[in-house]
Amino acid sequence: MISAGIRALAAHLPTTARTNDYWRERHPELVEAHERASLARVFGVADAAASSAEPFDVEMAPYLTDPFRGAVVRRIATGTALELDAAAARKALAAASLDPREIDLAIVTSFLPDQLGVGNAAFLARELGLRCPAWNLESTCSSALVALQTACAYVRAGDATSVLVVVSCTYARVADPSDSLSWFFGDGAGAFVVGRVPDGEGVLGTGTIHTAETCDTFHYDFVDGGIRIGARRETSRILRETAGGYLSACCDRALARAGVAVSDIALFAFNTPTAWYAKTCSRVLGIPAERAVDTYPLYANVGPALMPINLHHAATSGRIAHGDLVLAFTVGSVGTASAAVMRWGDVAIGPAVPAPEVCA
């Protein structure tokens, strides 16, 4: 069988950042209310959970007294999702030394796209000058891993030589700044090129399941001429109760299909929707927390773009070496949870993400 995997990887983050001072200055009453409260808007629980033995609760406990629950900086897009898509895609293509006309298939997730009804794939194809099919793929925060699996399948089947995957997130524009849910969200994009790799490298095993148990968590409404994201009352309980099960089910399956053990993995790239999620995953799998990459303090929650951004950060900071086994895991509410075991090869890496230039 043809081996397939990531051949080039890039990330693009907006240069504008928003710190906690943004809310302290503009919404002091909201911050004050959460400083007094014993629970967070979405992920927090009662103080009694601090004594819980559940991994999610144990790792969350240190953040219960922080009104921002571990969020520090978020990158905020001042333009469109398509601009993020195009910037990340161009960096990945440049790293791969590929012309857009050499791409055989483009798979695009823009969460959320710039227009109602259709995604950004055709618009990105026009922007880049692609001559290949361009698809929209959406599986919430697991979109990047689902797209990776799909791209690898096309390469293994001989139907494509080079597949471009582009994933962006523009949470900040759909989160109401007067809602504490906005504290967790940032914007950003990642892109990677999938192609044939030497035998024994690339994606070795995957595991994906649906997350139908989370259907009563986040919702999207049309408010004042725009989309707003919200969280239902059940969100905290559902996310806490399903976190460990989704992780174990996907990772166990991916590891078994790859024929390796969790102890063989050099680096874990969990998605990081909260400050404690990577540590929760590490505790569930029984690995040292320092073996996982965590960009939450830098970017907060950038949804489906977390997987490529976290991998890119690990690569540019020298945490992945040729031949390392890497396990990536993502969970998407009202979508899928997915894991992939990869043998890291000669992956061309786009430039490191520069520090922000402007604070909003």
Image (tube, rainbow, N blue to C red):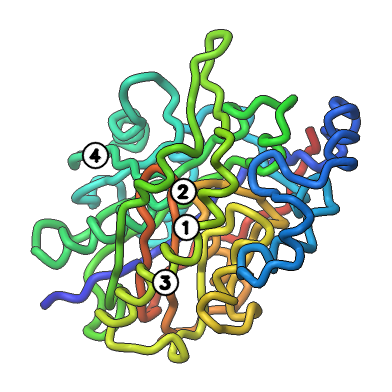
User: Mark 1 is on which residue type?
Assistant: Thr
- Say which quarter of the image contains residue 334: top left
C-alpha separation, residue under disc 2 versus residue under disc 1: 18 Å
C-alpha separation, residue under disc 4 versus residue under disc 2: 18 Å
| Front position among marks 3 and 4 | 3
Residue 19 in the figure: left or right of residue 138: right
Residue in the foreground of this view, choosing between 269 and 36: 36
User: Mark 2 is on which residue type?
Assistant: Pro
Disc on the earlier residue, 3 or 4:
4
C-alpha separation, residue under disc 1 versus residue under disc 3: 10 Å
Read off the residue under disc 4.
134
Image quadrant holding the C terminus, namely top right
Disc on the earlier residue, 2 or 1:
1
How far across and down, in percent of the image, does residue 346 sit? Answer: 39, 77
Which mark is on residue 304? 2
Instruction: Give the SS element for disc 4.
Output: strand
User: Mark 3 is on which residue type?
Assistant: Ser
Image quadrant holding the N terminus, namely bottom left
Disc on the earlier residue, 4 or 2:
4
Query: Which residue occupies 73% across, 52% down?
Result: 355
| Front position among marks 2 and 1 | 1
Instruction: Give the SS element for disc 3.
Output: helix
